[in-house]
Amino acid sequence: MKNYLLTPGPTPIPPKILEILAEPIIHHRTPQFRKILKEATEDLKYTFQTKSDVFIFSSSGTGAMEAAVANLLSPNDTVITIEAGKFGERWTEICKAYKINTEVIKVEGGRSVEPEMIESKIKAQDSKFKAVFTTLCETSTGTTHNIKAIGELLKDTDTVLVTDAVSGLGVIPLETDNWSCDVVVAGSQKGLMLPPGLSFISVSQKAWNLIKDSKSPKYYFDLSKAKKASDKTDTPFTPAISLVIALRESLKMIREEGLEKRFERYKKMAEAVKRAVTSIGLELFAEKNCQSDAITAIKVPENIDGEKLVKTMREKYGIWVAEGQAELKGKIFRIAHMGYIREKDIIRCLSVLEKVLHSLGYKFKRGETIKVARAILK
Amino acid sequence: MKNYLLTPGPTPIPPKILEILAEPIIHHRTPQFRKILKEATEDLKYTFQTKSDVFIFSSSGTGAMEAAVANLLSPNDTVITIEAGKFGERWTEICKAYKINTEVIKVEGGRSVEPEMIESKIKAQDSKFKAVFTTLCETSTGTTHNIKAIGELLKDTDTVLVTDAVSGLGVIPLETDNWSCDVVVAGSQKGLMLPPGLSFISVSQKAWNLIKDSKSPKYYFDLSKAKKASDKTDTPFTPAISLVIALRESLKMIREEGLEKRFERYKKMAEAVKRAVTSIGLELFAEKNCQSDAITAIKVPENIDGEKLVKTMREKYGIWVAEGQAELKGKIFRIAHMGYIREKDIIRCLSVLEKVLHSLGYKFKRGETIKVARAILK
C-alpha cells in the first residue's frame, strides 16, 4: 500500500530530494561542502525573509527552541510565554528548565492571543520582560497567532520577540525583518519538505545585544560559536551533511516557486479542507479568526471513535493524518497541508475520510466534501 | 571522478543504507516506527556491549557529550578531564561552559594517559571527583587511551567514568559493562557507517544515581525525558526518522558480521597502513603503545607540503584523507580505517599516496607500501 502523509511533520519528501539523500556522502571540511552550506544559508534567509544571520543545527526543532532560551537569557530573567497549546507550553517548560521567571499568558485551545494582553504587561510601569515567546502556527490546535501585531508592539521596546515557526515556515506568511521578529526557529520536516534532523534559527541585531550578556550554560547550541564558524562558511560541529545537501535542493524548489505563490497555494488547500469538512457538518477546533492555513484541526463528531478514525484511515487506506495530542487525544484529528502536499492529496484524503466516517456510522451526504474541495482547488 | 572517503567521519555509506535513505518517509508516532526504534535500540546495546540504557539523540556526537556533562553534574562539581588532543579538550570546554571545576590531565599529542596519573588524583585524601572524562580514540592524533584500566581504577569508587567513543565504537574494542564505563557517547558517521546526524549515549545505574542530583539546566538533551519516552518505545522529540531507519540496518550489518570479527578486520587494516607507510620512511605520530586501530596519523615528511599532499590526493585522485587539526595542520595527515572501508580501499589509498608523495619530491622505493600492505591483508 502506498502511504500518503498529511501529518504535520514529517511531511512527504519530493522524489528529487530522496534521490539526493541516496548519493554517496562527501566530507564537510572541503570547498565542495562549503559551497553547498553557503547556498543553503542564503536561501534560508530568503525563506525566513531576513537579512540577519540564520544558522543550521543538527537537531529537531526543539533544539533550536532551547538555543533561543539558553543564548538570550540568564537565570532569574523574566519573560512572557504565550500558551495556546502544546508548543506554546514547550517555551514555558524550556524557560523553567533554565530558571527563567515565566509570566504565562494562557489562551484557551483553539483561540489565539489578543495582542492587547501582551501590551498591558509590556507597558506596565515595572515591566522587565527580556523576551516574549510566541508560536507562528500552534500545530496542536490548528491556530495561528498574530505575530505581526506582536512585533509591532515590541519593536521599539527592549523586549525581544521570539517565534517558533517550526510548523509554519514556508507555508504561511512570516516576514522576519518586516515584522520585527528577533529570533525565529524552524525545523526541516514540515514546510521545508525534508526528513527531520535539522533546525534553524535567525538572530537579529537586537537579539545579539541580549546574547552577549547571557549567563546560561550552552555549548552545542552556542550561537556565538555558530556565528564564528558561519563567518568562515563552516559549522562548529560535524553537520548532518546529507540533510544539508537536501536542504539546499528543497530551498531551491521554494525559491523557484516563490514564497508568495506557495502561500497562496497552501491558503487555497486550507480553504478547501476547511470548507469541505464543515460542509458535512464537522466542526473546526480553531476559531474563525485564527485558523491556520498550514493545518486543519477538526473536532471528532459525537459518538465517533477518534482514535479508530485515524487508525483506519492509516492502516486500511494509507492516509496518515494526526490525532489530537495530550488532552485532545480522541477529541480532534488534524489534516496537515504543508510541505510537499498537492491538491490531489487533499482530494484523496477527503475521499478516504468520507469512507471511514461512513463506516463508523456518521451520517452525511456522501461525495459532498469532494465537490466542495474541487470547486475551490480547480 | 569517484570519491573514496578514508576520512575519520563521515565514512563511506554502504549502498544498502543509501537505498534506505531514499525511501519515502513514515511518521514516527506509529507502530511501524516504534518497531524500528526498538530494534535499533536493542542492537545499539549489542554494539555498546551493555545491558544498560542506550538513547538516541538527533545531533552530532558533541550533543551527546554535552548531554553527559549537563545530566551528570551541577555547577561547582569537580571532575577530571584527560586531554591528549582536540576531542579530550572538548570535554574540558563543555565542563567549563557548565561551570564545572575541571582538573585537566594533559598528555602530549601522540601519547596516551598513564592510568597511574588518574589513580593518584582519585586516591588523594581530599578527592571529590564526580567524574573522569576520557576518549576511546583521540581522532586528532591517532591515539587510544586504556579505558579498561581506567574503568578498573574507578569501578569501586563513587567517581563515574565517561568515555567519548564517537570515533571508536564498532571499530575497536570497548566493553561498556565489563570495563565499568558508566557513560559512553558515540555518533553515527564513523564506525556505524551512517551520515552524521545521530548521537548515542549509554547510562549505567551508577550514572543514574548522579543524574538524579544534577542541577544543571537541560531540556533537549535531558536524559530523564529520554528515559521516560524510551520506556514507551518513543522519543521525547521528533527523531531524525530516516537516519534511525538507516541505523537499524547498519546495526544489523554489524551484528551479522559480529563485533569480534570486525575488530580483527580493522586491526589488520590498521597494521597494513602503519607498516606500509613506515616501510617507505614515513613516521607515525602516535607512540607505539597507544596507536589506534581506527585511524593512522602520519607525520608529513620534512620539505613536503602537507596541505598540498592532502589536497592533491583528493582533487586529482578522489582519495579523501584528513589533514591535521589546529596546531597539527600541515604537520600530520590521517588515514581512517573505520566504518565501511574494505581492504581494496586501503590499497587504492596507498597507491595514490605513493603517486602524490613522488610528485612532491619525496624519495622512496615505489611500490613498497602496496607490497607490504598486500602481505598483511591477504
Image: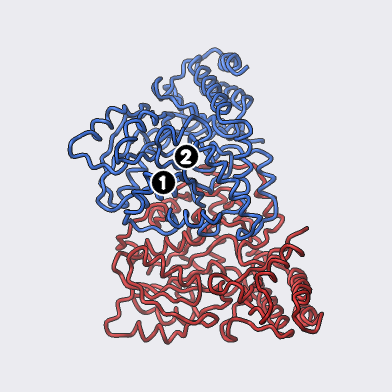
Chain colours: A red, B blue
Camera-side residue: B20 or B201?
Answer: B201
In-image side of B43 versus A23 (left or right)? left
- Determine which of the numbered discs, if any, sits on residue B40 in the image: none
Point out the tag, 2 or 1, that comes first from the N-terminus.
1
Query: Residue B136 placed where, x, y %?
Result: 42, 34
- At label 1, the amino acid type is Met
Q: Is mark 1 on a helix, strand or loop?
A: helix
Residue at image point 59% right, 52% down: A243
In the rendered image, is residue B309 in sight? no
Q: From this view, report whether residue B208 is shown above or below residue B105.
A: below
Q: What element carries label 2?
A: loop
Query: Residue A8 placed where, x, y %?
Result: 61, 67
- Determine which of the numbered discs, if any, sits on residue B65 in the image: 1
- At label 2, the amino acid type is Val
Query: Residue A120 placed where, x, y %?
Result: 37, 86
Q: From this view, report whether residue B198 is shown above or below residue B285.
A: below
Q: Do the residues labelled 2 and 1 touch (CB within 8 Å)?
A: yes
- Determine which of the numbered discs, if any, sits on residue B166 in the image: 2
